[in-house]
Image (tube, grey):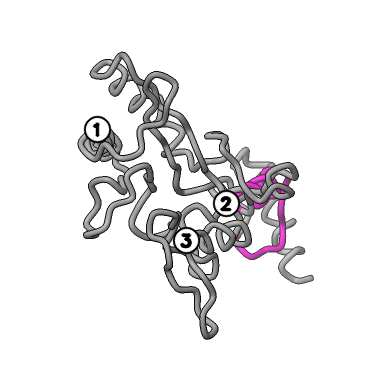
Amino acid sequence: MFNWIRLLFNFLSSFKQGISVTIPVGSGYKNDDDEEEKEDTNKSADEPEEMVIPQEVKEKGWSKNINDCHQKIKDAFPLVEEAFKQSHPDCYLKVDYTYRSPEFQFELYKKGRELKDGQWVVVDKTKVVTQKDGKTLSHHNVYPSQAIDVYVVKNNKIIWSDSELYTELGNLWDKQGLVSGATWKFSWKDYSHTQVDYKII
C-alpha cells in the first residue's frame, strides 16, 4: 500500500513539472502491451505439428504415394526423376512402397522365410523382400515415411536386376543428400530403396 501511495505522489508531482514518470519494476503495474508480449513469448511457432497417419493409409497398412514421404524425399524425387530421364529417355521411374505399418512390414518379412523352432529362417533368398521384421523398425515404418522404393521401368516392364542402372540412379539420390540402398556402406544392396539417413531421424 505504501508503495502505491509513494508512486501516486511521485506521479502527481511529476505531472505538475511536465516530467515523464518511469514505473518501477516490480510495482505490480501492467498494461495491455505487457500482456501481449507475455502471450507472444508463450507461443511455440517452431514446434513441429504432430503428423497423423491418414485413415485410408492406416486401414491399408501401406502407401505407394510419395505424398506420404518425408519432405526431403518429396523435394528430391522430381529432381532425380528429371536427371534420370535425361540420361535414359526410354525409361521412367515407378514409385513403389513409401509408408508401411510395422504389422505390414512383418508380413513382408515372412516372404521367403519359414518359422522353425520359433525363428523365421530364410528358405528362398529370391523371395526375401526385407531384413526388417517390424519390431526392428524400418525407415518405412514411421510417418511420414523416411524411405521410398523406386523401380526403373522400360518397355512397360520393371527392370529388377540391372545393378549398374540402379547404381546410377542411386548416385542421383546421393547428390540430393539422401542414402541410396544401391550405393550405401553395407555389403548387401537394396537397389530400389532410398532413405533420408542411416538412422531414423
Q: Which badge, 1 or 2, is on the more N-terminal residue?
A: 2
User: What number is the disc on residue 43?
Assistant: none
* Residue 2, percent from left and from top: 75, 71
At numbered mark 2, what does the secondary structure look like: helix, strand or loop? loop
Up-down relation of residue 12 to residue 119 (above or below): above
* Residue 18, percent from left and from top: 62, 38
For label 2, the crowd category at 10 Å Cα-Cα, with few meaning under 14, some 14 to 19 and many 20 or more, is many
- Amino acid type at circle 3 is Gly
- Closer to the camera, 66 or 3? 66
Distance CA(mark 1)–CA(mark 2): 26 Å
Up-down relation of residue 72 to residue 49 (above or below): above
- Taking the spot 48% from the left edge, 33% from the top edge, the residue there is 95
Q: Quadrant of residue 32?
A: top right
Answer whether labels 1 and 2 touch (C-beta < 8 Å): no
Residue 12 makes an appearance in the image: no
Residue 30 makes an appearance in the image: yes
Q: Which residue corresponds to mark 2?
A: 100
Asked whether 39 falls inside the magenta stretch, the response is yes
Asked whether 199 falls inside the magenta stretch, the response is no
Q: Which badge, 2 or 3, is on the more N-terminal residue?
A: 2
Q: Which badge, 3 or 1, is on the more N-terminal residue?
A: 3
Q: Which residue corresponds to mark 1?
A: 165
Q: Is residue 13 left or right of residue 110?
A: right
Q: Which residue corresponds to mark 3?
A: 112
- Taking the spot 26% from the left edge, 58% from the top edge, the residue there is 188
Distance CA(mark 3)–CA(mark 1): 26 Å
